[in-house]
Amino acid sequence: MTRAVIYCRISSDPTGRAAGVQRQETECRELAERLGWEVVDVLVDNDISAHSGKRRPAYEQLLDAISLGKIDAFVAWHADRLYRRTKDLQQLIDIVNLHKVQIRTVTSGDIDLTTATGRAVAKTVATWNEHEVEHAIERMKLAKSAAASEGRWLGGGRPFGFEDDGVTVRESEASEIVAAVRRVLMGGSLLAIASEWNERGLLTARGKEWSQTTVRRLLLRARNAGLVEYNGEIVGPAQWPAIVPEHEWQAVRRLLSDPSRQTAFTRDRKYLGSGLYLCGLCEDGSTVHAHTGGRGGRPHYRCKKPGRHQLIRGSIPVDEYVTSTVAEILGHLAKDGALRLAPPGSEDLSALYAEAASIRAELDAARQALANHDIDLKSFVVASKQWQADLDAVEARLERHGDRQPLALVMNAPDPVAEFQSDRLPIDVKRAVIGRLVKVTLLRTKQGRLPGGRYFDPASVVIEPRRAGSHG
């Protein structure tokens, strides 16, 4: 009896129910039964296009079965289920001619690739199929280009932050985007944002958990600023409202797209002092970084200096001391009113911070353009002078309102000390507050107990208030 395989494929299956391939299999089985063939296997490629060039695992299994002589024939619903590109047809011709297998289809008749006429017919049909697909792609591209130029939504899955129509803002998600943008502008971690969203049960528009990559992709999205992006270029304003101001989106885009700065804005910080506390031995502005290997597996801070003179300090007691000291400073600031913070809601401090960040990003871009000889020195001086004046004005307003947003978030809380020490305050915000208020330098200590039985020496952690954070 003729050993036959049924091959089924469908290009798109958004529901995931595979209803299309099931119908194909039913009709192929009926054909095989009429031919008196024994169906030894059913191979299925579901939701895979034959024109895209993507791997089709089941189709590869079919070719392997032919090459190994395991089957005598195969059945498909239509010839275009097997191939949509002429180069795929040529591969099938070579294998079929070598192993002499029969091919039958339910709706497009017999396919005889063993004769010159049969091959010519198959190639002609395949060529026109390929032309049809390419022409459809061209029409789709033209339609999308026209939609983009008019600021219309290009279609697809529901964008996070918007309703199914792609135009109406979904406020509950939009507020998360705004908060994430401003958190990144404060030096926040993409991975920390993803972890926090996942812990809260906030899912993507497709119902999946967040990752560092998906958060980054979301924040880089031009539609957040009310802009339409097509083929990697901004083509104009959109017909939907902006979720974040354009200058904030531009600032985030520069930060996350700059290879030299990506690491600092995407690494998940688990320790308060990693990359923040200074090494008292190096005396060159070097910071310490957290490690967990060695020293009994306990977390510790280590400077970059090699050898036996390297600074190594346990991170837990150091962080506890720094936290308690900064909390005490915050308490004095709140009591004395040393920082004249605006009442909550009197001015959008996060927007001011974002504006300052975007101006700095423009200045950085101008400096890079000058270094690359993309602009001349005269143009740079004129542009940078105006940007610096704008930056000075924004920073003066920030100074009057307690300076940077992280500090304002804490100081505007009902109990600043409790807010700073709370576990709900993100670690990147705590780091920003510490960095704004004080300079922390770690010194070496002697091994063993100190007089009085203590192990930790507070004098080995030098905490110096910065100018804007001075309270006395």
Image (cartoon, rainbow, N blue to C red):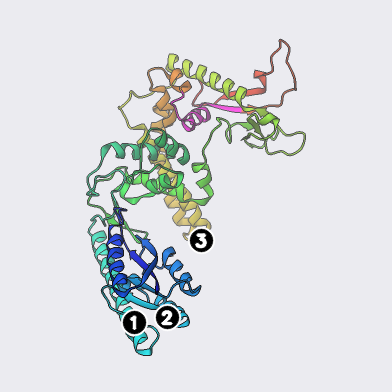
Q: Is residue 431 magenta?
A: yes
Would you say the residues marked 2 and 3 are in contact, meaning their CB atoms lie under 8 Å apart? no
The amino acid sitting under disc 1 is Ala
**Kind of residue sitting beneath label 3:** His
Out of 121 and 24, give the one closest to the viewer.
Answer: 24
Q: Is residue 425 left or right of residue 133?
A: right
> Which residue does the image show at 30% across and 48% down from the upper left?
159
Q: Secondary structure at mark 1?
A: helix
Residue 437 percent across, percent down from the top left: 51, 26
Between the residue at mark 1 and the residue at mark 2, the CA separation in whole angstroms equals: 10 Å
Quadrant in the picture for the N terminus: bottom left
As drawn, is 325 to the left or to the right of 77? right
In the figure, residue 57 lies in which quadrant?
bottom left
Mark 1–mark 2 contact, CB under 8 Å?
yes
The residues bearing labels 2 and 3 have C-alpha atoms spaced at a distance of: 56 Å
Q: Which residue is mark 2?
A: 93
